[in-house]
Image (cartoon, grey):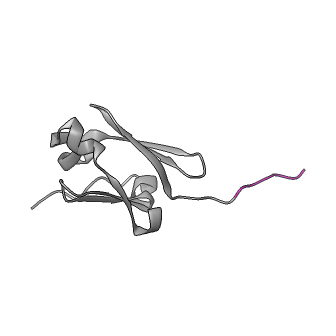
């Protein structure tokens, strides 16, 4: 039995953030969702600040310039919360 496998493309296609979750759609169609509480800078930001994100690292990362927050699709796929400030 043959299995048709498409190449994984972990680059960011789109981002949605509501009051509870960060949701990232990847170019290959997968969707990653994580609790917003894992990312305190995003949790504490206004909806307008959350909406102003840009792709970084060749599309494999996310950057919020106003919040100084950076996330990678690799970290999101691993389920890694943001590091806590000391």
Horizontal side of 40 relative to 13 (left or right) equals left
Horizontal side of 33 relative to 35 (left or right) equals right
Residue occupying image coordinates x 50% and y 58%: 11
Rendered position, 37 above or below 63: above
Residue 59 x/y as whole percent: 46, 62
Which of the 4 image quarters holds residue 18? top left
Farthest residue in the right direction?
1
Residue occupying image coordinates x 28% and y 48%: 52
Residue 14 in magenta stretch: no
Farthest residue in the top direction?
19
Q: Main secondary structure of the magenta part?
A: loop
Residue 5 in magenta stretch: yes
Residue 57 x/y as whole percent: 40, 68
Bounds of the magenta segment: 1-6
Residue 55 x/y as whole percent: 39, 59
Residue occupying image coordinates x 82% and y 52%: 3
Q: Quadrant of the C terminus?
A: bottom left
Which of the 4 image quarters holds residue 85? bottom left
Residue 15 x/y as whole percent: 40, 44
Residue occupying image coordinates x 17% and y 42%: 45
Rendered position, 68 above or below 41: below
Farthest residue in the bottom direction?
57
């Amino acid at each position: 039995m043959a299995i048709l496998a498409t190449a994984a493309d972990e680059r960011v296609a789109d981002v949605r953030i509501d009051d509870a979750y960060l949701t990232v759609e990847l170019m290959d169609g997968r969707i990653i969702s994580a609790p917003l509480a894992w990312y305190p800078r995003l949790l504490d930001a206004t909806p307008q600040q959350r909406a102003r994100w840009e792709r970084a690292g060749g599309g494999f990362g996310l950057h919020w310039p106003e919040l100084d927050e950076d996330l990678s699709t690799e970290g999101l796929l691993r389920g890694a919360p943001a590091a806590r400030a000391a």
